Image (cartoon, helix red, strand yellow):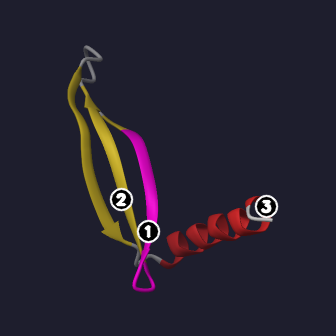
Amino acid sequence: MKQLSSFMVLNIDGGDRVSYTYNEIDDNTGEPLSQNKKENFWVVDKELKKHIDAIRSYVRENKLN
């Protein structure tokens, strides 16, 4: 199984890119198979973009004042 350990959204040239890190765990033993694997993707899904924009707005309105 893959277990998400971190993620971040980067704004690059006006587009959003999600970078994430995960660990792979053996389903039967619970032992780690690999750690700190990193991947990323460009946000092209409109629904995902709405969620990212909502988080960005929350931070601006509630944490930057």
Picture coordinates of residue 29 (x, y %)? 25, 14
The residue drawn where x is 39% and y is 64% is: 18
Q: Is residue 51 left or right of residue 43?
A: right
Q: What range is drawn magenta here? A: 4-15
- The mark found on residue 62 in the picture is 3
Relative vertical location of residue 16 with respect to residue 64 in this rendering, above or below = below
Task: Name the residue beneath numbered marker 2.
Answer: 19
Q: Is residue 42 left or right of residue 63?
A: left
Q: Quadrant of the C terminus?
A: bottom right
Q: Amino acid under label 2? A: Ser
Task: Name the residue beneath numbered marker 1.
Answer: 10
Q: Amino acid under label 1? A: Leu
Q: Is residue 55 magenta?
A: no
N-term-proximal mark, 2 vs 3:
2
N-term-proximal mark, 3 vs 1:
1
Classify 10 Å Cα crowding around label 3: few (below 14), some (14-19), many (20 and above): few
